[in-house]
Image: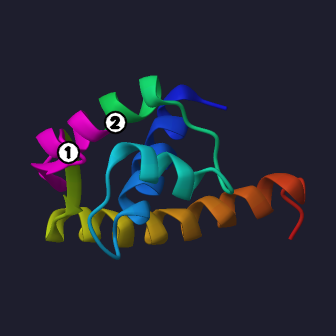
Amino acid sequence: MDVQLKRGLLDVCVLSAIKDGESYGYQIIKDLKPHVEISESTLYPILRRLESLNYLTVKSAEHNGRLRKYYHITPYGRARIEEFKGDWKEMLSVYEFVTKGGDN
């Protein structure tokens, strides 16, 4: 799979994992596991990039005596998910064209 396409898909998957409420790294990995395999070394750069794009915010809070980062989706992050849904419809159209061999 194209690296840029995969990166975009992972970004939206991470945003979707936190769209219903804040979460933290390990929980995001667990939530994504049934759908996509992602490691910590892949997830944390994605989270930093999404934060820099203002798609999510991060706060630190103590949990069992340690600081844990919690991620929360922003309205820009929600808009990115909606944009992806529109893009995906176009991708499906291209896929159908390619798999049918262009026959109409």
Q: Residues within 10 Å of mark 2 (few under 14, many from 20)?
A: some
List x then y, in percent, for residue 36.
64, 47
Give the farthest residue toward the top: 41
Of 83 and 96, the residue lying toward us: 83
* Display colour scheme: rainbow
Numbered label attached to residue 69: 1
Tell me which segment is drawn in magenta.
47-66
Image coordinates of residue 8 in percent, x first then y, are 44, 44
Q: Quadrant of residue 55?
A: bottom left
**Viewed as shown, does residue 16 lie left or right of 73?**
right
Residue at left 64%, top 40%? 37
| Residue 46: quarter of image | top left
Element assignment for label 2:
helix
Tag 2: amino acid? Ile
Is residue 82 highlighted in magenta? Answer: no
User: Which residue was labeled with disc 2?
Assistant: 46
Q: CA distance from mark 1 to mark 2?
A: 14 Å
The residue positioned farthest toward the bottom in the image shown: 20
Residue at horizontal 60 percent and vertical 59 percent from the top:
91
Residue in the picture at 37% in, 66% down: 81
